[in-house]
Amino acid sequence: MNDQQWNTLSSAVRGEMLRPLPTAFIIDSPWLPNWTGHKILDYFTDERIFLEDNLKAIRIFPETIFLPGFWSEYGMCTEPSAFGSVSMWGEDDFPFAKKVLRSPAEVERLEKPDVHKHGLLPFVIKRLQHLQPEIEAAGHRIRFAVARGPLNIASFLMGTPEFLEAIKTDPELMHQLLTIVTDFLVDWIAYQREVFPSIDGILLLDDIVGFVSRRDCEKFAVPYLKRAFDADVTVKFFHNDAPNKASAPLLEQTGINLLNFGIQHTLTEMKSWTNNKIALLGNVPPRDVLAEGTPEDVRRSTTEMLNALEDRSRLIVSCGGGMPPHAPTENIKALISTVEELTR
Amino acid sequence: MELPVHDLSALQKAVIEGEVSAAVSAAQGALDAGVLPVELIGQGIGPAMAEVGKLFEEGEYFVPELLMAARATKEIFVILRPLLAQSGEEPMAHVVLGTVQGDLHDIGKNLVAAMLEGGGFEVTDLGVDVPPEKFVEAVKKKPVQIVGLSALLTTTMPAMKNTIEAFRTAGIRDQVKIMVGGAPVTRSYAESIGADGYSETAAASVELARQLTGTLG
């Protein structure tokens, strides 16, 4: 992300009215390598492909912001791998992290990983360090510390149904698990910031927050998100494209100031539930419109979405969730140009 | 013959609230008092799980509540299954479920399994990353009325089509109804690959399974 884009993003988060409204998209695998014609595994393992794919996206869509920008990642495997989770790879499949805890009681033997040494974490750091000169030569800087959120990591370590059941059957052990995971996250975010001083934002991704009730969110999500986001940075960005109705009113107290959510809710609903205190990144349907629709469908959907919204402050137009697999160039261009025309 | 009506409110309450041991005790108590297993399912578990599904659809219940109710139901069936076998009662239908090849996600599939069991179906869960031939094998092994295919990734959705194709190739496509579901799956996709039914939620899968087996009450 270049300085101008960062300033635009920060201004939107602060609630300044921007004309035209900014657009931004979370991009990662599988969309990015598929879009450039590379295999997902090559994207993860080849630094040149990673760099070229990201630069190509920036070149083709100079008018938009890509978040978090040069995202060094290994899908869902990054953080679980530090806890000893086996990462499973396919040539062109999304990687999968195998669970490491076979019962809630096994939390007792779980240790906090060393973020400098364990799993894929050194690979994440090294990739960015190796490419940093070229990223900066292209006018961009590394702006975000990125990680999966505490519930998401916990669910990969235990299995999602097992974790969600255990918050009912073994709440104390699940608090113990979330404490270890959050201690780890605090270290991991601090380490990324230490290595890359240009970082002024945190992005956490956690869809599991959307699977629990408001009461469970208060108990099992809010305290841990609050700790993970407790850092002196400008942008505290959260992604949860599962349902948000229960969690949205609670997010402000965690320090989150930018939220990417799914298509279950309208921007108006989300503005009301967040009391318009959190900037929103959304909300064109990613699969049915952005990936599978025509440019005309994208224009219609974007126009309807913007016209339905009275207050356009704290809004960055995007799709609901990350960039969907197979979203074509012309549809993304259609979204960007429609926003520009309507909000100039 | 019409079945007598029993007060199974304690059982229903325990299932709805996901109180596993209370649900099992209430079920055992009802059986001891002479309630037939088939009555326990039809008047106790079935309505309780339907209420759980309704609460989920209304946004009152979330995944953990659904999972706990399903677990309570599952534990009751541990007691009921041998009794049903003894009495010669047939389950509503036999469903074989699995997450398709290449996909390791199980939450949706597990929820559907639990809801169907609660709805009186016999469920064989083949697990995750299930190759088409394993589904075919399961159907050849014992009578199966419904096959349920789950996928969470757009990249694994084509494996649903391959699985349906495998049933055709094996010459047994007409023997079973195939229903599909999962976050990226849509009704139009289900139709395009030749599935017999699509369910958007785990709770709705029970009604769909009843429709597919012609047992909708």
Image: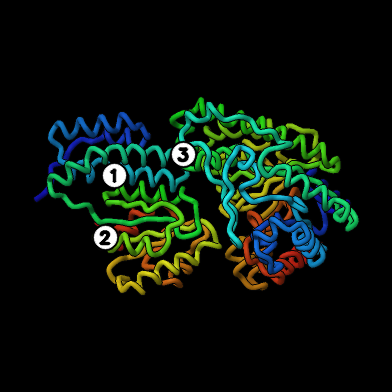
Callout 3 environment at 10 Å: few (<14), some (14 to 19), or many (20+)? many
Q: Chain of mark 3?
A: A
Gap in Å between the C-alphas at discs 1 and 3?
25 Å
The x and y percentages for residue A76 are: 61, 48
Q: Nearer the viewer, mark 1 or mark 3?
A: 3
Q: In what element is the residue under mark 2? A: helix
Numbered-mark total: 3
- Amino acid type at mark 2: Lys
Q: Quadrant of the image for the C terminus of chain B?
A: bottom left
Residue matched to label 1? B47
Q: Residue B19, located in which quarter of the rendered image?
A: top left
Residue matched to label 3? A162
- For the point 81% across and 59% down, the residue is A20
Relative to B131, A265 lies left or right: right
In-front residue for pair A143/B103 = B103
The answer as to whether the residues below labels 1 and 3 share one chain is no
Residue matched to label 2? B141
In this view of the protein, can residue A64 be seen by the observer? Answer: no
- For the point 88% across and 52% down, the residue is A133
Gap in Å between the C-alphas at discs 1 and 2?
32 Å
The x and y percentages for residue A270 are: 63, 47
Q: Nearer the viewer, mark 1 or mark 2?
A: 2
Q: Chain of mark 1?
A: B
Q: Chain of mark 2?
A: B
